Image (cartoon, helix red, strand yellow):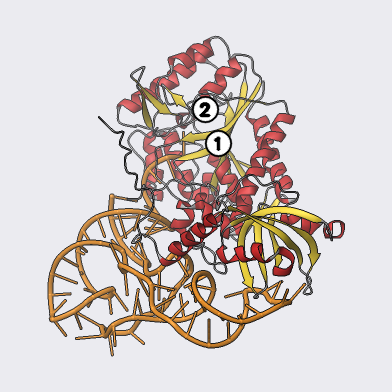
Amino acid sequence: MTTKQEPEIQSELTAEELNEQMRIRREKMSALAAEGIEPFGRKYQITHHAADITGRFEALEGQTVRLAGRVMTFRGHGKAAFAHIMDMSGQIQIYLRQDEMGTNTYALLDHLDLGDILGIEGKVFRTQKGEISVRATSLEFLAKCLRPLPEKWHGLKDIETRYRQRYLDLVVNPEVRQTFLLRSKTIKALRTLLDAKGFVEVETPMMHPIAGGAAARPFITHHNALDMKLYMRIAPELYLKRLIVGGFERVYELNRVFRNEGISIKHNPEFTMLELYQAYADYQDIMKLTEELIANVALEILGTTKISYQGREIDLTPPWNRLTMTEAVKQYGGVDFSQVKTIEEARAIADNLQVKYEPKDGVGGILNNIFEEVAEKHLIQPTFIIGHPTEISPLAKRNKENPDITDRFEAFVFGREIANGFSELNDPIDQKGRFLIQVSQRESGDDEAHMMDEDYITALEFGMPPTGGLGIGIDRLVMFLTDSYSIRDVILFPHMRHKE
RNA sequence: GACCCACUAGCUCAGUCGGUAGAGCACCUGACUUUUAAUCAGGGUGUCGAUGGUUCGAGUCCAUCGUGGGUCACCA
């Protein structure tokens, strides 16, 4: 005879693992259960949020309301008590009296802890000190909080804990909540603006057989059933342009891309990008669209196009300044690159300015390095840099007058690239040639060079209309709009090393 | 990847010259029916990030490691 053996599950923490406060909270939880009250309750129908009550006090005074939220403060006064509870909208004070709630219900407060989530029913009133409050008639435990919350006055400051346990950050640091609400509004505003212009939002693959559309190292994964290598996308560009070939004239995708690169205050391995493509437009049209989009989002979210970032005033009002890369290098580096024809001349100028370059860099690559070194940091006010070398722009259309540069722009704010766009290269012969150059660079060790994408060339051979395209780094945009120093402050769960 | 900084109670932080581990909030006990950083009386709850080393003695000095942050490199 065999008996089914239940595996012994060690789900509860041992007494040694619990500190005093956690132990006491668990005891209170057990005490509630012993009285037949579920410490982790069920559905609670609310009638109002905290801000509804404080905002419409005159209309609601004396009326019965139901609200729910987390207990943030508690002040006991014997047979009466005050608490603040916080919901999505904010906080409101609750006044509890033994004679109004009944001795039994009031006694439940003995088992209450800061952080517990309660449902409260009561009447709206104003205290003698003038605070709009709810006079509780009943109380329900919706979730017991078994761990002590961070301190009410100083909040949670430890950066590691704030990122690893973002929920705590959100509970105790109201400005963090604001930042992420603003992020959500920014993304919504962008969608609304684009939808109004006839752009269609699409979803293209995040797992690519060939990682294209940008110069970056990809994350590599594996499909078991097909036994094939896949790359997490570094950009949706080549798929979105296939849709332009297919007749979608205005498309956009606003979602995550993944780049296997370093982490910094400006870089997270996964970040959010808006990419859009507009058929029959060129980079000039897209520049106008870019400044209009960003200015309108700021207006929508902040009510102004003049923002303050890290103590600097930044005016996002269109039109933004436009400067060619060569002009920028002349203005900020004092060197005239317009007449440079040979690699030797370019290297000499770079050496003179102590700007580094690699053997693979041509005249255009060196110009770009110099630009980044001498000019970028000066571009505080919104500026479009245009006329990027063809060498560093393998997907952009050549300029009609000068085939060595492209009809491309990058938008800089506070010295940081915030957008990148160009007239798309729709000539399949030229595109194949550019890919071949990339492939040879890749073979000589540049693992950020493009891979050959024959299928994309085939798509172009069917004919892609002249098209303007744009990419906007949404995290960086949100950083500006929320005056956030680090990209981690606008990403809910930034990348962290696995602990333990 | 290099360099610099941080890591002490649940949280925010002190900790002198190497000599028994501290404060505020939170928590516990008691009082209190309009408080709001409630107040009053009492109570320190700790693997000082980890491991070695020096020393009679290490939170403190040294080394290595871990995690996080910053600067640089990298990332057009």
- Is residue A317 in sight in this rendering? no
Nearer the observer, A451 or A378: A451
Q: Are marks 1 and 2 on the same chain?
A: yes
The percent coordinates of residue A375 (x first, y second) are: 51, 48
Q: Is residue A197 above or below residue A490?
A: above
Q: Residue furthest front?
A: A1
Residue A236 image label? 2
Residue occupying the point 60% across, 49% down: A180
Give me the residue at 50% from left, 28% from top.
A404
- Relative horizontal placement of residue A424, taking residue A196 as reference (left or right): left
Residue positioned 36% across, 30% down in the render: A220
**Residue A226, percent across and down?**
36, 17
Q: Secondary structure at mark 2?
A: loop
Element type at marker 1? strand
Report which quarter residue A285 is drawn in: top right
- Res. A273 mark: 1
| Chain assignment, label 2 | A
| Mark 1, other Cα within 10 Å: few <14 / some 14–19 / many ≥20 | many
Relative to A155, residue B75 above or below: above
Residue A264 at x, y percent in the picture: 44, 49
Name the chain letter of the residue that bears numbered label 1: A
Give whichever of discs 1 and 2 has the lower sequence position: 2
Question: Is A115 situated left or right of A66 in this image?
Answer: left
Identify residue type, mark 1.
Met
The image quadrant where one finds the N terminus of chain A is top left
Mark yes or no: residue A235 visible: yes
Tell me the amino acid under the disc marked 2.
Pro
Residue A49 or residue A378, whichever sits in front: A49
Q: Which mark is residue A140?
A: none
Residue A301 coordinates in the image, percent (x, y):
70, 47
